[in-house]
Image (cartoon, rainbow, N blue to C red):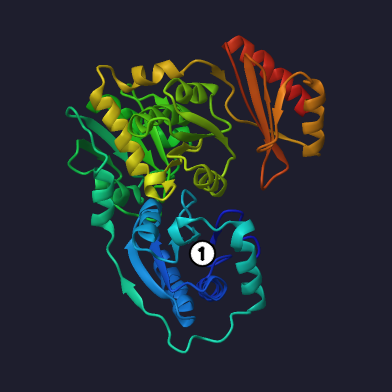
Amino acid sequence: MAGVFKAYDIRGVYGDTLTDDLAWRIGCAFASWLKPRTVVVGRDCRPHSVPLRDALAAGLTRHGAEVLDLGLCSTPISYHANGALGADASIMITASHNPGEWNGFKLCRAQAVPISGATGIAEIERIVERGEFGPPAATPGQVRAVNITDRYRQFVRSFAQIRRPLRIAMDFANAMGIVEAAALEGLFDTIRLFDTLDGSFPNHEANPLKPETLEALRETVRRERCDFGVAFDGDADRAGFVDERGEPVPMDMITALIATAMLERYPGATIFYDLRSSRAVREAIEERGGRPMMSRVGHAFIKQQMRDHDAVFAGELSGHYYFRDNYYTESSALAALHVANLVSSADVPLSELIRPFRRYAASGEINSRVADVNAVFERIERAYPSARCTRLDGLTVEFDDWWFNVRASNTEPLVRLNLEAATPEEMARRRDEVLALIRT
């Protein structure tokens, strides 16, 4: 059981650190702690998601909860079902982009509010460890199959504004993007890659953050002369994009692009951007009359900040795109649709739509192993006394013509540097300067 209770979810290797018995205990603990009347449960396509579902549901129903079983679904669909069905909670069985032997649980309260380590996972772990489930309910709950697919499809398609025929390549990586993107069927011509559900992920890892996973998509976009391509991760709560030339589009540039669409729909709205994002994202939101706000890294933080400020949209550098319309949660189908709407309405291809946001030179994320993270932060602050410094997540240091963020890894003795400057030459010089401070 050690190590499966994480900062944002519960995750481990099936049959080793994550077993059916542990799933049953988690179901008992979840129901004992939150006392939900109804719990939406969905699962990805890993073979062991079925026995985990059965064991989890047995624990939940033992303590009186009714389980609304979605069957196979994407994580965004499970979030949508949580809110749309008025459930008290939801649990998605998935290990996202992890290899096929992994599995896990993503937990939410009502209205798809995430449960993190600080807001419940640690307490559930304590209950599991001590076995303090309390007595079974006098009347056990029932498991009821629920089909939310058509409802989600109608929700996504209500945002469609396709002005001309499009051809879009979609790489599903044998995973839940197949179910997520079903909401888009018929809106444009789709070239489908790896569209057979297979939880062993035989073609490539379901992780669009890794450049090597995009090779087949890039080749297909070029060969088939597509308008762009989309790659989904394992549970389809993330999406990566390539333009009409097959070139990967940085995910913060997609944030800026979708922000333009959201501000047309919701003038003057608040939009959050990941603090690692290009300064161009903030500028693009301001230029279109929106209110940009910087967010911490991590979906639980971003979703709470969005709720606190009634933000309509947020984008994260990892390819998560969050929409108020989907209960402040991810919807990769909506992200793909907004990009398709914009491309279909433009006289130029996606690469040209993105070009105005490519204003600065970025270092990309650079990891450094350090002995003392706080000492690194203190050393940097002393080195730049005239800078604007914020501690929203790690340390962000800003000047008029360059900036950087240094933040600690949650799991390793590493700090992660993201730096941006006006020119590639200035970026390289400043990057080396800051790395020298970090690695002293």
Q: At 47% from the left edge and 38% from the top edge, which residue is drawn? A: 314
From the viewer's perspective, is residue 375 above or below residue 42?
Answer: above
Left or right of 220? Residue 321 is right
From the viewer's perspective, is residue 178 above or below residue 319?
Answer: below
The quarter of the rendered structure image containing the N terminus is: bottom right
Left or right of 385? Residue 39 is left
Provide residue 414's location: percent of width, then percent of height: 70, 39
Q: At 45% from the left edge and 42% from the top edge, which residue is drawn? A: 207
Mark 1 lies on a secondary structure that is loop
The quarter of the rendered structure image containing the C terminus is: top right
- Residue 440, visible in the rendered structure: no
- Residue 64, visible in the rendered structure: yes
Residue nearest the observer in this picture, 149 or 194: 149
Residue nearest the observer in this picture, 404 or 436: 404
Residue nearest the observer in this picture, 295 or 216: 295
Q: Residues within 10 Å of mark 1 (few under 14, many from 20)?
A: some
Provide residue 170's location: percent of width, then percent of height: 30, 38
Provide residue 397's location: percent of width, then percent of height: 69, 25
Q: As drawn, which residue projects farthest toward the bottom?
A: 138
The residue identified by callout 1 is 14
Q: At 49% from the left edge and 86% from the top edge, which residue is drawn? A: 137
- Disc 1 marks a residue whose amino acid type is Tyr
Left or right of 231? Residue 433 is right
